[in-house]
Amino acid sequence: MIETLTITGVDEDTEPGDLLHLARWFPFVELAVLAGTREGEPRFPRRGWIDDWLGMAAAAGVQTAVHLCGARSRAARDRNWNDIGRLARRCGRVQVNLPQDERDAAATALADLAWFLKRPVIVQHEGPWETSAAAAQAHVDLLSDSSGGRGIASFESWPQPRDGRLSGYAGGIGPETITEALGFTERYPDHRIWLDLESGVRTDGAFDTSKAIAVCSEVDAARQRDATRTRRSRTGR
């Protein structure tokens, strides 16, 4: 079953009240903000805005994540955690966006970062789960995205969810493709799954709340179907 739907890329042009309402209406939603050195550019809010947003979300009981990019992801890799800690401790999960060829060498450092922050750290991966050096690390959540963050749909390449571990999937998910993505997740109602989407809920580069609502509604219906199937299997009716 889909446990979490991560909507990435909330930014300064998005009305915070709309985001909080969305997350309250769909409590399985996790709202993620990109934190990098390109502050002030589209999708990359300024640090002050991020701090204010995380404060509002925490007060409202909304799930949040911070996705570290650029110099901040390299700081995570290199164990320069003081500034990261001040930012990341205000959210629920932290994703470290590193190039594919740097992830394996950073696996131990990112597992230690999870311990340091006292919250899960997300690592992207392309390929079978077992080929990731971070797969065996505690408190590290793996996100499968064979498109490498380019927002290209590749549902046929998604690996089967890991037993007993939260398994994430990304790549080309949006209103036009969510049905196909759900066709995959509904084959695994007893596994813990999360979906992550970013480009699929943007229009002309800007966050599009109407697209986010459309995806959330489809996921909500799928979760209800999974819950019904699970209940019937347990009761034999």
Image (tube, rainbow, N blue to C red):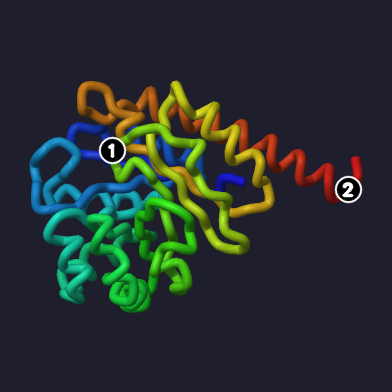
In this rendering, is residue 99 above or below 173?
A: below
What residue sits 58% from the left and 54% below the top? 192
Displayed quadrant of residue 172? top left
Q: Position of residue 16 (x, y in %)?
A: 28, 38
In this rendering, is residue 23 above or below 82?
A: above
Is residue 45 left or right of 14 when viewed as pictured? left
The amino acid on which the numbered mark 2 sits, given as a three-letter code, is Thr
Q: Dot 1 corresponds to which residue? A: 150
The amino acid on which the numbered mark 1 sits, given as a three-letter code, is Arg
Q: Is 32 or 136 nearer to us in this picture? A: 136
Circle 1: element type: loop
Q: Position of residue 93 (x, y in %)?
A: 37, 60
Which label number is shown at residue 141? Answer: none
Q: Is residue 113 visible?
A: yes
Mark 1 surroundings within 10 Å by alpha-carbon count, few (fewer than 14), some (14 through 19), many (20 or more): few
Q: Dot 2 corresponds to which residue? A: 235
Circle 2: element type: helix
- Alpha carbon separation for disc pair 2 and 1: 43 Å
Return the disc, 2 or 1, that comes first in the chain's sequence.
Answer: 1
Q: Is 133 or 72 nearer to us in this picture? A: 133
Is residue 23 left or right of 95 when viewed as pictured? right
Report how many numbered discs are placed on residues in the image. 2
Circles 2 and 1, Cβ within 8 Å, touching? The answer is no
What residue sits 18% from the left and 73% below the top? 78
Q: Position of residue 118 (x, y in %)?
A: 38, 74
What residue sits 91% from the left and 45% below the top? 236
Q: Is residue 4 visible?
A: no
Mark 2 surroundings within 10 Å by alpha-carbon count, few (fewer than 14), some (14 through 19), many (20 or more): few
Q: Position of residue 57 (x, y in %)?
A: 34, 50
Foreground disc of the pair 2, 1: 1
In this rendering, is residue 123 above or below 185?
A: below
